[in-house]
Amino acid sequence: MARIVLTDASVSINAVDLSQFITSVAISTSEDVVDTTGMSSAGARTRLAGLQDNSVTFEFNQDFAAGGPEITINALASSLVGTVTTCIVKPTSAATSSTNPSYTFSAVCAEWQVLSGEVGSLSTISATWPITGAITKANA
C-alpha cells in the first residue's frame, strides 16, 4: 500500500492559493452520537450517528505581502469574522485524480490572529474553522 509524505499539499482559501504559506492542514470529521436506549435494550445503551461536525485547522507562516495569508484572511476576518469562505485542499498540487483527490468545503472564518510569535522566531498563525455543510471529495 502506498504512503504519502506531505511536501506539496495544495490549499486554496477564498480562491487564493496559499499553499506556499501552509505548514500544516488537518480536515477533521466527527458525528454526534445520539442515545437511543429504550426499556428493552437488555441493560445496554444503543446509539445512532447524528449530525456531522467537521472542521479544518490551518497552520500558516505569516506574510503581509499581497497574496499572503494576512491580506487574504484579514479581508474576510477584519470586516466580519464569521464570513463563510470556500476552501479546497489536495494532498499535492498535481491535477485532481483518484490518487490526488480534492476536498472542497465551506468554512466559517471564526478566528484569525493577525500576528503571533516570539523574539527571533518565525511568525506563525494557527486557525481552526468549523465547516458548514458537507465536504465534497472529487477524484477527477
Image (tube, grey):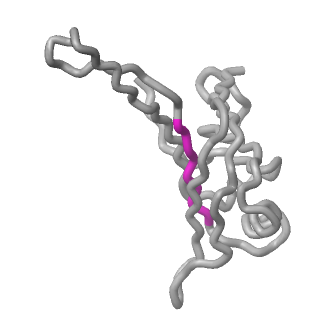
Closer to us: 68 or 1: 68
To which quarter of the image does residue 37 belong? top left
Secondary structure character of the magenta stretch overall: strand
As drawn, the residue found furthest toward the right would be: 66
Q: Position of residue 32 (x, y in %)?
A: 44, 32
Q: For the magenta stretch, what is the residue range?
A: 53-60
As drawn, the residue found furthest toward the top would be: 40
Residue at 22% x, 9% y is 40
As displayed, is residue 53 above or below residue 84? above
Residue at 57% x, 60% y is 59
Q: Position of residue 48 (x, y in %)?
A: 39, 20
- From the viewer's perspective, is 65 left or right of 94? right
To which quarter of the image does residue 131 belong? top right
- From the viewer's perspective, is 130 left or right of 49? right
As drawn, the residue found furthest toward the bottom would be: 119
As displayed, is residue 118 above or below residue 95? below
Residue at 78% x, 69% y is 78
Magenta includes 58?
yes
To which quarter of the image does residue 137 belong? top right
Query: Which quadrant, please, contains the N terminus?
Result: top left
Magenta includes 68?
no
Query: Which quadrant, please, contains the C terminus?
Result: top right
Q: Position of residue 105 (x, y in %)?
A: 69, 37
Count of numbered tags: 0
Closer to us: 38 or 70: 38
As displayed, is residue 89 above or below residue 65? above
As drawn, the residue found furthest toward the left would be: 43
Q: Position of residue 62 (x, y in %)?
A: 66, 71
Closer to us: 129 or 69: 129
Closer to us: 114 or 124: 114
